[in-house]
Image: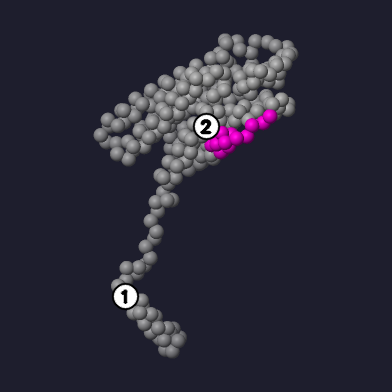
Amino acid sequence: MESPVPYRIDFFALIIFLGAMQGLFLSAFFLNKKNRKYLHNIYSGIFLISLSVVMLDVLLCYTNYMFNVIFLNDSTEPFALVIGPAFYLYFYTKINSRNPKKYYLHFLPALLYFIHSIPFLIQEKAVKYNGYISAYHPNLPFIPEPGKWDYDLFSLRGMIKPFIFTSLVVYSGLIIAETIKSVKNKTSQSQDKESIISDTVTFAGISAVIIIVFVSFDRDFGDYIIVTASALLVYFFTVKILNQSAYFHKKSPEVKYSKSTLSEDEKDEILKRILFQFENEKYFLNPNA
């Protein structure tokens, strides 16, 4: 399906695209065989994949390329409900080196919403088209929906924003509570505390941006601001990983005799004597040497 409106490629589109690609790249790093031995890396990977998928969905909507892949419209909504739980579990396992009890229940809302969304996901393109323009291009005319049937049995699709809102508020609260608990722990090192506080402030800040946009903008008009802020979160993760990488903190191997007290002239004189003995006396030819 061709777009009935011009495509839009601008600064925000570039930031969102690069942020999503960086997020997917980092998730592959966290989930490789070596790094997934640590629980917090697994949840980091899940968090970044979920965030990147949502960012790409919003990017398609923002640039109007969603018209070309209209069957994908609103297919990433369950991923938005994974972001909060994944970041909280990353945070919890990083501090405690273990999962909380019944940790899998944190992903239950996303799973239930996905199951509820299946009837919509298999709908005709006309349904997806009308859903997209109602959110991003309300001035465009709707098209007939052949064989329309109830694909929102419990009327939950219209509640996705309140669900995301609630998820972010709840998990921001849990993260802040876990941070306070960790900071009060006298056995924690100051460097660890700084990292924990930094993660908390960052997630709480992004959550605040999302909540403000939800309240301030009608429909999905402000989603590009949310995913732009999310891209900045991905860049923050990247800088943090680079700062913690052992690669940039390796000491250069000390050269043997690098602390010799001999002057350069003395070194040259010794070398000349060695070469003279090597060329004239030829001790290496003497089997008894």
Placement of the C terminus among the 4 image quadrants: bottom left
Placement of the N terminus among the 4 image quadrants: top right
| Displayed quadrant of residue 186 | top left
The answer to whether residue 238 shows anywhere in this view is yes
Q: Is residue 157 magenta?
A: no
Position in image of residue 174 (x %, y %):
38, 24
Whether pointer 2 and pointer 1 mark residues with C-beta atoms closer than 8 Å, the reply is: no
| Secondary structure of the residue carrying numbered label 1 | loop
Position in image of residue 203 (x %, y %):
43, 30
| Secondary structure of the residue carrying numbered label 2 | helix
Residue tagged 1: 262
Task: Using the image as rendered, state which of residue 225 and residue 132 is in the foreground.
Answer: 225
Question: Eyeballing the image, is 119 above or below 31?
Answer: above
Q: Residue at x 41, y 32 (%)?
A: 202
Q: Disc 2 marks which amino acid?
A: Thr
Q: Sequence order check: which comes first, mark 2 or mark 1?
A: 2
Q: Disc 1 marks which amino acid?
A: Leu
Please name the colour scheme applied to the rendered image.
Answer: one colour
Task: Using the image as rendered, state which of residue 7 and residue 238 is in the foreground.
Answer: 7
| Displayed quadrant of residue 142 | top right
Q: Is residue 257 left or right of residue 228?
A: left
Instruction: Report the mark closest to the observer, 2 or 1.
Output: 2
The answer to whether residue 28 shows anywhere in this view is no
The stretch in magenta equals 6-21
Dominant SS in magenta: helix
Q: Residue at x 33, y 76 (%)?
A: 263
Outermost residue to the left: 186
Q: Is residue 13 magenta?
A: yes
Residue tagged 2: 228
